[in-house]
Amino acid sequence: MTAIVTLLADDPLGAAREDLGPPLADSYHTAFDAIHADPNQCLVVAEDNGSVVGTLQLTLTPGLSRKGALRGTIEAVRVHATCRSRGLGARLIDWATDEASRRGCVLMQLTTDASRNAAHRFYDRLGFTPSHIGYKKLL
């Protein structure tokens, strides 16, 4: 799990949000256990020679809109800096899209921070459209 959190912290936004410890905060373990126990959550990693070099979380959300559609949400996509621009991120997204479709989702959605211009270009290339404006409120 430390390898995943390290990926999440490996940029200016993540560095301000994550806490690598040591030790790794109990809240990460609690979150991991909850994700692992929920059949509508998929936390995946990509490995290279035994090292975690990529990750994402896929959440399947049932809803009443769109005639009771199931939708997939991709979050926390990260690829290690040494592995970027080699197609790994696209393979992770393709896996998530295929898995969501296999499980009956009718659409895939994601958010990305407004400051992540390279990520915007990446998602555009993969066929995502910036169709909505997202809001967040810290609690």
Image: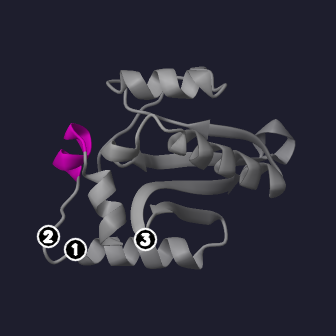
Q: Residue at x 43, y 73 (%)?
A: 32
Q: Quadrant of residue 40?
A: bottom right
Disc 3 to disc 2, how far (Cα)? 22 Å
Helix, strand or loop at label 3? It is: loop
Q: Comparing marks 1 and 2, which lies closer to the viewer?
A: 2
Residues at badges 3 and 2 in contact (C-beta under 8 Å)? no
> What residue is pinned by disc 2?
21
Q: How many neighbours does mark 2 have within 10 angstroms: few (below 14), some (14-19), or many (20 or more)?
A: few
Q: Give amino acid for label 1.
A: Ala
Disc 3 to disc 1, how far (Cα)? 24 Å
Q: Residue at x 68, y 40 (%)?
A: 108
Residues at badges 1 and 2 in contact (C-beta under 8 Å)? yes
Tell whether 6 sits left or right of 77.
left
71 versus 130 height, above or below = below
100 versus 115 height, above or below = below
Disc 1 to disc 2, how far (Cα)? 7 Å
Tell whether 27 sits left or right of 51.
left
Tell me the magenta residue range.
11-17
Name the foreground residue: 29 vs 11.
11
Q: Comparing marks 3 and 2, which lies closer to the viewer?
A: 3
